Image (tube, helix red, strand yellow):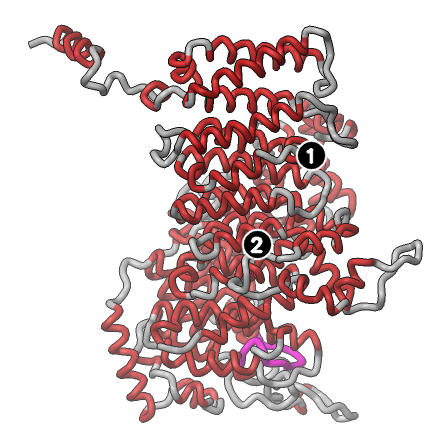
Amino acid sequence: MYSHGSESLIKQAREIQDSELQKFYSRLVKLLQGKELGYETVDSLQRLHLILSANKYIRTLPPELQKRLQSLLSSPAEPFQVLSSAVLRETLPPAAHSGNYSQENIVQLNSHAVALLLSQAGSRADVSSLCTQLLRGLESRQSEGPTNSLSHTLPILNTILTHNPGCLTEDHVTLLSKKLVDWLRYASILQGGGASSGGFFTGPRSRQPVPIAELDGTVSGDFFTVLCVGQSFTEDQWMNVFSFSALRHWLLTYHSVSNGNADTAHRLQLSLSLSLSHSFSNDDRSEVDGSVVSMVSVTSSCGRLLPPKERLREKSFQYCQRLIEQSDRKAHKKSDADLQKACLVEAVCILDCVCEEDASLVFRAFPCIKALFGRLSSDLSFARVLLPIAQFYLNHGEMAAVDCGSVWALVFGRFPSELFSDPFLAHELLRFLRLNLESLQLRVPQYTHSFPNLLKFLAWDSPAVVDDFVDLLPSLVTAGTAVELLHTLLDLPCLSATLVLQVRSTCLPISEQSGRGLLSLDAFRSPSFRGLFLFLLRGQAGSGDTIDRLSTLHELLVETADWPRVVQCAQIVPVLLHIFFNTVITVADEKLLAHLILVMLERSSLLLNIPKYNKEIHRVFSSHLLRLCKLHPSLVMDQSHELLEFSGATANVYSKEEIYTHVVWVLGEYLSVSCDSRCSVTLITSCFEALEAVLFEITSSVPPPGADCPAPRVVTTLMSALAKLASRSHDLIPRVSLFLSKLRTVTRDGSVAWCSDEEDLVAIVTRGEELWSLLKAPGVAQSVLTPPAHVTTPQWHRDTNVALPLRLRTLTNLTHSH
């Protein structure tokens, strides 16, 4: 919502009268006619923009003001460019404005003017016309226009390409590809403006051209790149830099506007033949420019014989290999070292792009990429450079038949385990995983077993990466990893606490304000507990499902329950568990699902004691326990012993109300011969006796110290389950009826110790009377309490044994005319 002051200004802008507005227009025209534009002009332009944008109707400015604002687009001061562009966007576009730029002023365009032109373009033809004029400006010589014309044109074209790539024709693509080749490969290797050694006789004529240098200070012996340095740059050197910055975007986009690509086999044959013939023919332009031909150039194909697009691909390949060579030089400044890393990322990505277009380049690029990986893999400060290398291996490693094991050991091993606290790496690595999810699942077996390592990113900074793991988690759920992954998700808060302790243990001893040391940090450093923490910090799955001494670990980490990272991590675990169970039912068989039910029962009492965490986990377990048993009712029979043991423990009524209620419900619902032929009267009787004992105990005694009264739905669920079991074994009906009659007698005297709310007690008694009445007629009770499937999911309109389909067919025949 707007503040009171902002709402007042907007209201004034909407209610301004036309006469007052015309006076404001005139005053603004006079301000724009002045030689110096100051703060008053800026303030007036801001007011004009507010007036125009606050009104839902589009206004038309006076022609003179429109003309002044258009001229302001080329102002040297960027604030005036921004304001004039914003104001003109709110007005009616002038007639044929988008295509009315002459060759003289087209070179004066900036990004704000282009944004205006693109917003006012009526069709793709208007944008295409603008591109034509811009490209025509690129063909003119530098002496024919301003010296900065080229440096503005290429970023503008890149902006147009971003928003509307379809506006470029095949001729546009061909022309710009040729220009990019010239700028990338044939920029001057001499510094701009000359250089002087100083002295009394220093003058323009005494200045001699100085060669461009490398980042380590040596004279450059090859063509100019973005990693070359000098005191000043020439126009074509600046274009070299701009071209490299836009190159990958151009390579990824320009084929979308092409009428058709050459046949891949033909291009492969042509490139291989040219590569062989190049040993007898060097690049002609390299000799003309006087640059020394590098080893990269010697092994490349002859660009003169290639079409423009393929020539650009070849020169891009040479440029990137030259950058990789330059990155091996020791930079004197930290900023230059950072530039080297950034250029390496871009160079590897461009090589990946050109290899996707031309498969023959893979075999020429891999030696360079492999050497680069070998040089950088031991230094984790280059982690963000190594990710594009991993992408290259993923895309082309199979074709080149190279071993990628060391790459994946680094990406899924050292990166998460040692750099989990780097937010930038976490973002880029998880983005890499999301973009290549299908390829990783098919080609990289290490991926699905690396979840203990990958989850460290989530344990360390869960709010920042939870969206990534919502997408990634289903791909990590397999029949072989499901059980261990479930344990790992439940232990995620423990992992979060352990990572914090790991970071703190590398620093000075940490104490609380009271002076008492952290017991969890002492335990982390203790050799006797080291194995517990090392299991949490493991890098791969397969070393075990969970920790034997899990309760001991939770006691050691009890003081970490209120740490912010641990609390945030615990909040997202229920979400991940829902995703896990929704996925596991699609990949698991009944044996695995039965094992997961055991894990749920076991882990319901083995969770880190975080406020509300246990209840949320129990709620998730309960909902998915019902879902699993509904999909596979035989699971109740398979795990009947464990379910009976869980439901027979009275303590679970008070500490695990949610999951206990649902376990009792599935026992009463699915422990039946109709669900599984293995179900026997003996098993039904055993289950009945276990539930009967619990129900009798909680309704005849005071709750344990510190525990609340049992929830009413626990009592009613127990009564319903007993009634269902008795309806399947009529010998048990008298025992249930006796209990229900006693329950009604006991509650007549008023309140009872096991139920503190009178309304709840009335609801329990009412449910007991309903069940007692039903059990008087055993046949009716069974059909009501456990109705068959054809009753709960009727399809009478499809059943040929009932009269409804016959009636429908008769009515259909009567209504259809013959």
Q: Amino acid at mark 1?
A: Ser
Picture coordinates of residue 693, whole percent (x, y): 60, 27
Kindly give the residue lying farthest to the left in the view shown: 818
Q: Nearer the viewer, residue 215 or 105?
A: 215
Magenta region's main secondary structure?
Answer: loop
Tell us which disc is closer to us: 1 or 2.
2
| Residue 197 position (above or below residue 769) | below
Left or right: 489 as drawn, with respect to 475: right
Q: Residue at x 38, y 87 (%)?
A: 299
Q: Nearer the viewer, residue 475 or 359?
A: 475
Q: Nearer the viewer, residue 28 or 468?
A: 468
Q: CB atoms at circles 1 and 2 under 8 Å apart? A: no
Left or right: 464 as drawn, with respect to 157: right
Question: Is residue 102 at all visible to an observer of this figure?
Answer: no
Occupied quadrant, residue 532? bottom right
Left or right: 128 as drawn, with respect to 757: left
Please provide the residue range marked out in magenta.
224-235
Q: Residue at x 47, y 41 (%)?
A: 639
Of the two numbered discs 1 and 2 on the same chain, state the one appearing first in sequence: 1
Residue 232: within the magenta?
Answer: yes
| Residue 589 position (above or below residue 161) | above
Occupied quadrant, residue 684? top left
Question: Is residue 550 at all visible to an observer of this figure?
Answer: yes
Residue 494: within the magenta?
Answer: no
Q: Secondary structure at mark 2?
A: helix
Q: Which residue is mark 1?
A: 26
